[in-house]
Image: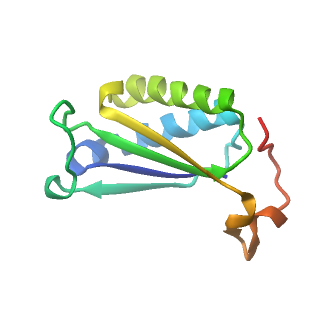
Amino acid sequence: MPQIKIYGLRENIEPKRLALSNAVHSALIEAIGTPEAKRFQRFIILEPENFIFQRDRTNNYTIIEISLFEGRSVKAKKNLIRLLYRNIEQTAEITPQDLEITILETPRCNWGIRGIPGDELKLNYQVEV
């Protein structure tokens, strides 16, 4: 059950929100087997004075943070990153130069979901892919 945060300038993110959402979710489904119904995304809309970045980036600069249970293989995570770059460039027209992705993994016991620790959840999908 990955939790996704997408950061970017208002002028870039608002018109591309649906395209970004779909691009990210389809990559998660394909790369790590996230179930279709498990879509947890937050868009953090920033004004220019609150989003400082390198001059070699454009106003399309976007950061994606993915928090998930540990257990995915390096191969699966690299595939996810490649799919994210491809999908986002194709559907949201954000080039790889303007996109940074971070995957943050934590043990399931560090999550609290539906009133219990994450390692006590009965999952309907595989984490070890």
Q: Is residue 58 left or right of residue 64?
A: left
Q: How many marks?
A: 0
Rendered image quadrant of residue 53? top left
Rendered image quadrant of residue 30? top right
Q: Position of residue 12 (x, y in %)?
A: 25, 42
Q: Position of residue 96 (x, y in %)?
A: 36, 26
* Residue at (60% x, 26% y) in the render: 79
Q: Is residue 12 left or right of residue 92?
A: left
Q: Position of residue 68 (x, y in %)?
A: 63, 51
Q: Is residue 24 left or right of residue 64?
A: right
Q: Nearer the viewer, residue 128 or 2?
A: 128
Is 24 placed above or below 2 here? above
Is 4 placed above or below 62 here? below
Residue 2 in sight in this render? no
Residue 85 in sight in this render? yes
Q: Is residue 66 left or right of residue 6?
A: right
* Residue at (67% x, 49% y) in the render: 37
Q: Nearer the viewer, residue 43 or 112?
A: 112
Q: Nearer the viewer, residue 88 or 119?
A: 119
* Residue at (58% x, 34% y) in the render: 26
Q: Position of residue 38 (x, y in %)?
A: 66, 51
